[in-house]
């Protein structure tokens, strides 16, 4: 099976460090902190303007990307998936202008954490449909429900990786709550083929 994995919040634990860094940045620009803990980070949790959100990412994401931790058991299950004969395609939308050098920061992080994969692909947009079709991906794993729904509507089978800041609500696509859960869901897909 050809498996597509997003990097941020699928392989990395972006939300953990992002929340910490956002609160530090907020203290410096507004000092209001979290105003709605139940909302998504940039959709009501803070009272930032669009320009403030863009400024935060432009000034910080390159640095933050190098500091991210790996999601729990991620490496173990990626290695196991490869041992099972699957191919792993890392498909990310790390792009300029927020990332000054997305390739270098990504490769450095992957090498540092000894992540095994067959190919690294930089998508042109958050919607990875084109890349999934081009590389004949059998299932794409992404943390963004909206992007998974778009890809699914365009014929790409998706599983949504749940994160600590995932929006609440009813999901129409399969959800993986952990890497173990994801591994089991992928194996179920293989059994049903």
Image (cartoon, rainbow, N blue to C red):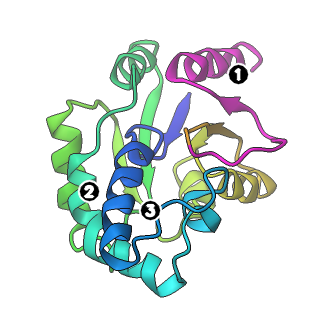
Q: Nearer the viewer, residue 30 or 2?
A: 30
Tag 1 near tag 2, CB within 8 Å:
no
Q: Nearer the viewer, mark 2 or mark 3?
A: 2
Task: Give how far apart the Cα atoms at labels 2 and 3 are.
Answer: 15 Å
Question: Which residue is identified by label 3?
Answer: 93
Query: How far across and down, in percent of the image, does residue 100 sit?
Result: 23, 74
Magenta segment: 165-193
Q: Nearer the viewer, residue 92 or 31?
A: 31
Residue 169 shown left or right of residue 33 in the figure: right
Q: Secondary structure at mark 1?
A: helix
Task: Give how far apart the Cα atoms at labels 1 and 3 are.
Answer: 25 Å
Q: Residue at x 70, y 32 (%)?
A: 175
Name the quarter where the C terminus is drawn: top right
Q: Secondary structure at mark 3?
A: loop
Q: Nearer the viewer, mark 1 or mark 3?
A: 3
Q: Secondary structure at mark 2?
A: helix
Name the quarter where the N terminus is drawn: top right
Query: How far across and down, in percent of the image, does residue 131 sit?
Result: 53, 58
Residue 107 shown left or right of residue 145 in the figure: left
Task: Decide: few, some or many residues near mark 1? Use Cα within 10 Å; few <14, some 14-19, many ≥20.
Answer: few
Question: Which residue is identified by label 2?
Answer: 64
Q: How many marks?
A: 3
Vertical arrangement, residue 45 with respect to residue 145, above or below: below
Question: Which residue is identified by label 1?
Answer: 189
Res. 113 mark: none
Q: Residue at x 23, y 41 (%)?
A: 110
């Amino acid at each position: 099976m050809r498996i597509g994995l997003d990097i941020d919040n699928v392989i990395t634990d972006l939300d953990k460090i992002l929340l910490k860094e956002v609160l530090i940045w907020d203290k410096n620009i507004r000092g209001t902190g979290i105003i709605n803990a139940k909302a998504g980070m940039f959709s009501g949790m803070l009272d930032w303007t669009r320009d403030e959100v863009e400024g935060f990412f432009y000034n910080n994401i390159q640095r933050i990307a190098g500091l991210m931790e790996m999601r729990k058991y991620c490496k173990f299950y990626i290695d196991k998936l490869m041992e099972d004969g699957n191919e792993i395609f890392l498909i990310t939308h790390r792009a300029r202008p927020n990332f000054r050098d997305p390739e270098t920061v990504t490769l450095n992080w992957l090498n540092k954490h000894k992540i095994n994969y067959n190919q690294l692909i930089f998508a042109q947009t958050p919607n990875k449909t084109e890349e999934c079709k081009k590389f004949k991906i059998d299932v794409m794993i992404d943390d963004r429900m909206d992007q998974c729904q778009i890809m699914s509507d365009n014929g790409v089978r998706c599983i949504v990786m749940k994160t600590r800041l995932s929006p609440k609500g009813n999901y129409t696509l399969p959800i993986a709550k952990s890497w173990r859960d994801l591994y089991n869901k992928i194996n179920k897909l293989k059994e049903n083929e």
